Image (tube, rainbow, N blue to C red):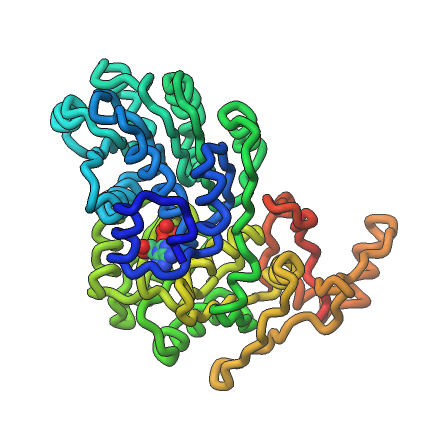
Amino acid sequence: MFSQFALHERLLKAVAELNFTEPTPVQLAAIPPALEGRDLRVTAQTGSGKTAAFLLPLLNRLLGDANSKQRTDVRSLILLPTRELAQQILKEVERFSQFTFIKSALVTGGEDFKEQAALLRRQPDLLIATPGRLMEHLNAGSLKLNGVEVLVLDEADRMLDLGFAEDIERITAECVNRQQTLLFSATGGGKVLREMIAKVLREPVHLKLNSVDQLSETTVQQIITADDPGHKERLVHWLLTNETYRKAIVFTNTRVQADRLYGHLVAADYKAFVLHGDKDQKDRKLAIDRLKQGGSKVLVATDVAARGLDIEGLDLVINFDMPRSGDEYVHRIGRTGRAGADGLAVSLICHNDWNLMSSIERYLKQRFERRVIKELKGSYQGPKNVKASGKAVGVKKKKTDKKDGAKKSAANKPAAAKRRSNAPKAAPSSLVSQDGMAPLKRKKPAAE
Ligand code: AMP
């Protein structure tokens, strides 16, 4: 019940109007300390209800101040990585503030600068902005941030990925009178995020809601073994044809693979879209609009391109490639099964995905359901021998003198050597998880 929170009645009325009955775990954990004025560091993905978790306390503060009518400057700032996320947040702000007089404005790249400057002159209470464009306005003198009381850094990890570290530092320094900072990220982040947290947050409450438990409740997680990328493409095709779903997203680790798969799907008459780092804002908007309106049902995407997407009705996630860390897996799969709805996540596992998959199983403390599609059963069914960790038992090379060894191994194991040379190449061994899992070193392909 939202009435358990000490929120202004106008906000509770909006929440009721939106039919939000039960707070989500992130809302339960974040709203009380945020209402007390504490700084927060929250790890939660899109789809968890994180927006309301910071917006409700923020709007509550704006409503609670009796002197607010005399204020003329921006009182709260939400900084986020992309224009499209900014638009999503603005929509949420409008929904939650529908029974109030709180004025909000959007300042993002790709829109008319002068129009934005005019909006800023109308003295919004709440500003939603991307760092690059906000810096331009600061430099042009169209706004000051010394009235900002609450600063929200949403998808902080993604802002850093996009190279906004310096801008964020400068912007936070401009908010000289801020009383509260709320930082949200989808992943645990790396060193740069930790450094930023140390700089901008004061004794934060740390809430980790990248909830592994939440995942298992509503989403069925399966793996299907595959022989090679071509086999994976056939499996994707089969799943998209035979599964029941409203909307599906297929994740690949590379742009090239995303384009390739997209090409196949379009050739097979699927109404699909592709999103990756080479696509511009226009393509991105078109893809997202079509998917939201139902004109297309399938999106092929890389992780970075898909960050922050909130698409209702997404109930099938296919991992064409296994994501490189447990956090990224949670982030991908967290898009399905929202708000109690059922979701299905299928990961396609080739020989060189196996160890990564088993590391992720250990991280999640669960075993994915093994699934076989009879008509597309391949020859690879997982390693013959696995260690206690679930990883494949590799073939250890004997230490021999080089020349001698080369001769011997060629003579002794011609079939195995041939199989190995045909096996897909393993990814570089430098992949390290960002989430405290053991380093995800790839082993030499196991003998199968
Ligand atoms: P978010 O993680 O903030 O992007 O939220 C994902 C979606 O869940 C949005 O469409 C929200 O409107 C919706 N949502 C957030 N909190 C609740 C709730 N307590 N009950 C129902 N829907 C919610």
Q: Quadrant of residue 390?
A: bottom right
Image: 35 above or below 418 = above
Q: Position of residue 149 (x, y in %)?
A: 36, 25
Indicate the quadrant where residue 109 lies.
Answer: top left
Q: Residue at x 55, y 78 (%)?
A: 371
In this view, 299 is above or below 180: below
Which residue is drawn at the image coordinates 32% and 29% (left, top)?
76
Q: Residue 355: x percent and y percent?
A: 65, 60
Q: Residue at x 27, y 31 (%)?
A: 127
Taking the image as drawn, is residue 345 in sight?
yes
Q: Nearer the viewer, residue 223 or 342?
A: 342
Query: Which residue is depicted at the point 14% across and 30% down?
Result: 112
Looking at the image, residue 12 sits to the left or right of residue 168; the answer is left
Q: Which image quarter is the N terminus in? A: bottom left
Q: Residue 73: percent from the left, percent from the top?
A: 24, 21
Residue 257 showing in the rendered view = no
Seen in the picture, residue 445 relative to 59 is either above or below; the reply is below
Quadrant of ligand 1 in image: bottom left
